Amino acid sequence: MLHPALRAPLAALALTLTAVAAHAADWPAKPIKFVVPFGPGGANDLVARAVAEAAAKQLGQPIIIDNKPGAGSVLGSDIVAKSAPDGYTFLAPAGGIITNPLIKAKMPYAPDALVPVALMAVSPSLIVVPADSPYKDLKSLVAGSKQGQGLNFSTAGTGSTPHFVAEMLKVGAGAKLQIVPYKSGSEGVVAVIGKQVDATSEASVVTLPQIKGGKLRAVASTWNRRIAALPDVPTAQEQGFGNVFIGHWSGVFAPKGTPEDILNKMNAAINTALKSPELRARLIPQGIDPLGGSRADFVKFLDDEKKRLTPIVKAAQMKED
C-alpha cells in the first residue's frame, strides 16, 4: 500500500502529465511566435517568414515573426531558451547556434536548452568579386591573394559565414587574406561593389541581385551543389577546394521541455510547407534550397556541421571580438 506521504506528490505529477498531454492534443490553440535572432531583410528572416506563412496554413493558427537581433544571434536565442516550453515560442536561427558556443568564452544559456525541431532551408554562399575584377574563378582569386600583400576579404564579423569561408581558404588553400569585419553581410557586399575590399562571401539571396545587376561576379558557390539560379557557377569543391563547404542554413528550435507531440506536429507542418509548390517557387529563384527532413535528420545535420567547423575554429584561433 502506498505511503500517505507519497500520495499527494504522485497525484500532482499525474495531473501535470495529464494536463501536458491534453495541452499537446489541443495545440495550437492560439498564435505561435518564431523569434528570428537577426534584423529583418536578411536570408534567415526571409526564409523564416516564408516558411511561417506556409506552416501556419497547416496548423490553423498564425505564426508571428519576432525579430530580436543582437550579440551575433545570442540575444534572440537566449530569449527562446528561457521561454515557457508550451509550444508557442520557437527560435528560427542560423549557423551561429553551433558556432557561437565554439567562439564565445561564455554563453547565457545551457548547451541543451534548445531542442532541434526542423531544418528549413539553406542559402548557399557565393564568393564574389567586383564585376570588373581580374579574378574569374576561385583558383585565380586564391593565386592572386598569394601575391604581394594579399587581398582584403570582408566579413559580417567574427564567426559569421563569410568569416568561415575566408578561414577555410586560408587554412585549406594557403590564401593570403586580410579579414575586414563589417556589421552585416550586406555591408560587406557593398564594400566589394565599392572596391574597398577585393572579395567576400555572402548568401545567394543577398548577392544574386547584385550579380544579375552587373555589379558583382560570382567565382564559386560554397554548398555541395550548384545553385539553380546560377547553374554556370561551379562549387568551390568542383574547383579543387574540398574543405570550402558551408551555407547559410535556417532551422527551427524549441525550448527544452516542449512536449514531443508538439515538436513532431511542428516538424510535420514545416515539412509539408517546404514541399508546397508556392513556397518552392518563392524560395528557389532566390537561390534558397528548401530542405526539411525528420527531427533526427536535423540532429545529424547539426552534429556534422559542428564536427566540420570545430577544427576551423581551432586552426584559425577564432575568438569573439
Image (cartoon, rainbow, N blue to C red):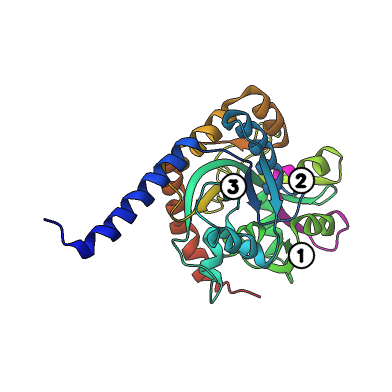
Mark 1 crowdedness (10 Å alpha carbons): few <14, some 14-19, many ≥20: few
Mark 3 crowdedness (10 Å alpha carbons): few <14, some 14-19, many ≥20: many
Residue that badge 2 annotates: 207
Is 251 magenta? The answer is no
Element type at mark 3? strand
* Residue at the farthest left position: 1
| Picture coordinates of residue 172, whole percent (x, y) | 54, 60
Looking at the image, is mark 3 or mark 2 earlier in the sequence?
A: 2
- In this view, the residue in front, 218 or 17, is 17
Q: Amino acid at mark 3?
A: Trp
Residue that badge 1 annotates: 183
Q: Amino acid at mark 2?
A: Thr
CA gap between label 3 and label 1 equals: 19 Å
User: What residue lies at 75% left-to-right and 60% top-to-bottom?
Assistant: 184
Magenta-drawn segment? 193-205
Count of number-bearing discs = 3
Residue 138 shows in this picture = yes
User: What residue lies at 76% left-to-right and 65% top-to-bottom?
Assistant: 183
Residue 249 - label? 3
157 left or right, relative to 216: left
Element type at mark 2? helix
| Picture coordinates of residue 260, whole percent (x, y) | 41, 44
